[in-house]
Amino acid sequence: MAKAYTPGLKVTPGMHYRSRRVLPTPGQVRVQLGDRVQGDTVVAETHLEGDVTPVKAASQLACPAGELPALMVRQVGETVSAGEIIARSKGVFGLMRQELKSPVNGTIESVGDSSGLVMIRGPRQPVQVVAHVPSRVVEVLPGEGAVIETDAAMVQGIFGIGGEARGALALACRAPGEELHEDLITPDMKGCVIVGGARMTATAIQRARQVGAAAVVSGGIDDADLRDFLGHDLGVAITGSERCGLTLIITEGFGEIAMAGRTFDLLASHAGRLACVNGATQIRAGVMRPEVVVPVDHAAIGAAASADQGELVPGAPVRIIRDPHFGLIGTVVALPERPVPLASGSRARVLEVAIEGGDTVTVPRANVERIES
């Protein structure tokens, strides 16, 4: 008998969480195989070349480009500070000499005798990769970084912004259908990962940033609120590099959508524990989901759960991802084998979903995603 599969989001109380922590360019690895690491432990580090600042030296000194090398006070390879004199014109009979000062700190990289430009390379920028999640090093990648692993509870979201953040889980809402308002966010949530219920409001997001929260996780968000928070429309396929002082993760979608009950219950059960979050989202090839990872002492991991990952079978939890039932959570009741006519006039293979609350709806199989456990 043929089987049906669909992409899904992980919402699991226990799994072997494994992550590659690697540098963007080759560098030095600071950990060894078997090391126990904390979230802020430096796994590997390197230095990136600084930015180049072009200086129109010949133009500012009012001299031909070919004469520029002879007018340089500081030479190629020398380090200079912002405001330091790097070149001086001959002037007239030694008088009225023009001086050129470096606009930045850096190293003189080149002096152009045809372009009249002096190139100043900024200081090298240190880059460090931390473990992010308390874990154990299970593989060392020479010159790149390491692979870390731990037992953890995990929740993947639909969308997020902001990079990696860590903090204790703080429950702001008491039910998955409760909206996250600013009055639910208190000063003692500084440094915490705040867990909401349904839509996070614009004022709640601003309040979370004001109190110094690490992140906010809730069921939904209004696209206008997100735009106001960022100050611009989000028109990229990859997020995570935003510098907005706060990481946001939505677990269900845009609009007035409550967090799935099982997701809320899982996060609520770990209130007070350290959560490691990452809002990075990629919606094209190489899909990447935002995630909340909570290290646990003993993960209940079943072999059967990983064996049927993504498979649509009766009893499987799913989320409907298209109208008219967008955002609803339920379980698969039946999977009729034959295609059936749809309202559009086309025919498609469908499934029956028992929605939380009691109703049963029939939807195309392409309109659901499996909630992996």
Image: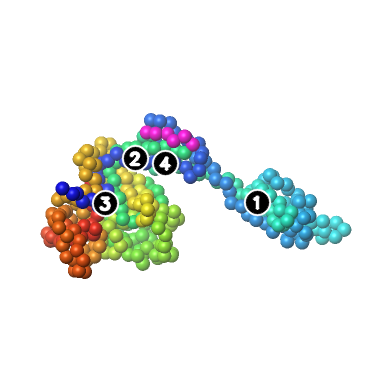
Of callouts 1 and 3, the N-terminal one: 3
Question: Residue 172, located in which quarter of the rendered image?
Answer: bottom left
Q: Position of residue 360 (x, y in %)?
A: 13, 60
Disc 2 marks a residue whose amino acid type is: Arg
The label shown at residue 8 is: 3
Distance (Cα) linking label 2 and label 1: 42 Å
The label shown at residue 120 is: 1
Q: Position of residue 272 (x, y in %)?
A: 29, 45
**Residue that appears at 16% across and 62% down:** 340
The label shown at residue 21 is: 4
Distance (Cα) linking label 4 and label 2: 10 Å
Badge 3 crowding class, 10 Å Cα cut-off, few under 14, some 14 to 19, many 20 or more, is some
Q: Secondary structure at mark 3?
A: strand
Q: Position of residue 76 (x, y in %)?
A: 70, 46
**Residue that appears at 15% across and 58% down:** 338
Q: Is residue 238 visible?
A: yes
Marks 1 and 4 in Cβ contact (< 8 Å):
no
Q: Secondary structure at mark 4?
A: strand
Badge 1 crowding class, 10 Å Cα cut-off, few under 14, some 14 to 19, many 20 or more, is many
Disc 3 marks a residue whose amino acid type is: Gly
Q: Which mark is nearer the camera, 3 or 4?
A: 3
Name the residue tied to disc 2: 18
Q: Position of residue 17 (x, y in %)?
A: 32, 41
Residue stretch rendered in magenta on the structure: 138-143
Distance (Cα) linking label 2 and label 3: 18 Å
Marks 1 and 3 in Cβ contact (< 8 Å):
no
Decide whether residue 141 is among the magenta residues.
yes
Badge 2 crowding class, 10 Å Cα cut-off, few under 14, some 14 to 19, many 20 or more, is some
Disc 4 marks a residue whose amino acid type is: Arg
